[in-house]
Image: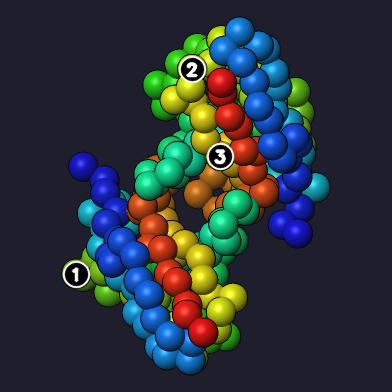
């Protein structure tokens, strides 16, 4: 266990659904990240939060909406997704930006 | 442009054999380089971290090297085991907090 948990582990949703992914870290870290991992592609950084403030948004479509209510929790709200959004979504945290990241187990998302 | 290139893309070896994975980068200004192991369906787990002044670092049967002049790193796995089957990802961080991931090397260990 890395100290980073993600729920749900698997999610199947239609293109008109609204769902949320949850990430929680018990490490006292100040930075949290959302990544997308598609087959045969490197990890794609989506969002970065540092001390609850969003510091990076890598041109992610607005159908993905992050929320960081406190330094221990991170959400990714999903709505009107496309089939090409099907991927493994990984959450990570680190003590500070650029420090070692600890990853959660990921949520396997399938959009039908 | 900040890039991290890994080779080979995929590697198959017999259990007990050694192997070496390569990582070349163009990230600047360089801060550190990490190797992660990612089992199928799981999040990556850190194996080693190396800063500019470190040439070699070991973690059990894993030994990472770093040549900051040529901007190359390698991950050597000794006496491979079936549990070493995974993707190995090279990640380079810059001093301005950019994090660049390689595509990974998919390693298959055959019994």
Instruction: Say whether marks 3 and 1 touch (CB < 8 Å).
Output: no
Chain of the residue displaying label 1: B
For label 2, the residue is: A82
Q: Nearer the viewer, residue B97 or B84?
A: B84
Residue at (75% x, 23% y) in the render: A69
For label 1, the residue is: B70
Label 1 crowd bin: few (<14), some (14–19), many (20+), radius 10 Å: few
Where's residue A18, x and y in %?
67, 12
**Does B39 sit left or right of A38 as displayed?**
right
Answer whether residue A31 is visible to the viewer in this image: no
Instruction: Say whether marks 1 and 2 touch (CB < 8 Å).
Output: no
Label 2 crowd bin: few (<14), some (14–19), many (20+), radius 10 Å: some
Residue B40 sits above or below residue A110 on the image: below
Residue A98 sits above or below residue B110 on the image: above
Chain of the residue displaying label 3: A
Answer whether residue B11 is visible to the viewer in this image: yes
SS at mark 2 in the image: loop
Cα separation between marks 3 and 1: 33 Å
Where's residue A63, x and y in %?
53, 13
Cα separation between marks 1 and 2: 42 Å
SS at mark 3 in the image: strand
Q: Quadrant of residue B45?
A: bottom right
Where's residue A48, x and y in %?
54, 32
Label 3 crowd bin: few (<14), some (14–19), many (20+), radius 10 Å: many
Q: Nearer the viewer, mark 3 or mark 1?
A: 3
């Amino acid at each position: 266990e890395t100290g980073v948990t993600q729920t749900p582990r698997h999610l199947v949703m239609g293109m008109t659904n609204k769902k949320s992914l949850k990430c929680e870290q018990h490490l006292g870290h100040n930075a949290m990240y959302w990544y997308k991992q598609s087959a045969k592609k490197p990890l794609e950084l989506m969002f970065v939060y540092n001390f609850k403030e969003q510091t990076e948004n890598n041109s992610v479509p607005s159908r993905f909406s992050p929320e960081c209510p406190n330094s221990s929790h991170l959400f990714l709200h999903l709505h009107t997704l496309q089939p090409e959004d099907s991927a493994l979504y990984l959450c990570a945290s680190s003590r500070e930006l650029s420090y070692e990241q600890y990853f959660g187990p990921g949520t396997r998302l399938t959009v039908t | 442009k900040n890039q991290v290139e890994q080779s080979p893309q995929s590697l198959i070896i017999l259990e007990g054999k050694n192997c070496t994975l390569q990582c070349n980068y163009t990230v600047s200004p360089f801060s550190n380089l990490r190797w992660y192991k990612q089992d199928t369906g799981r999040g990556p787990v850190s194996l080693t971290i190396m800063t500019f002044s470190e040439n070699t670092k070991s973690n059990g049967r894993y030994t990472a090297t770093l040549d900051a002049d040529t901007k190359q790193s390698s991950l050597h796995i000794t006496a491979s085991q079936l549990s070493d089957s995974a993707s190995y990802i090279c990640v380079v961080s810059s001093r301005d907090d950019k994090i660049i991931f390689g595509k990974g090397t998919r390693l298959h260990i055959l019994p």
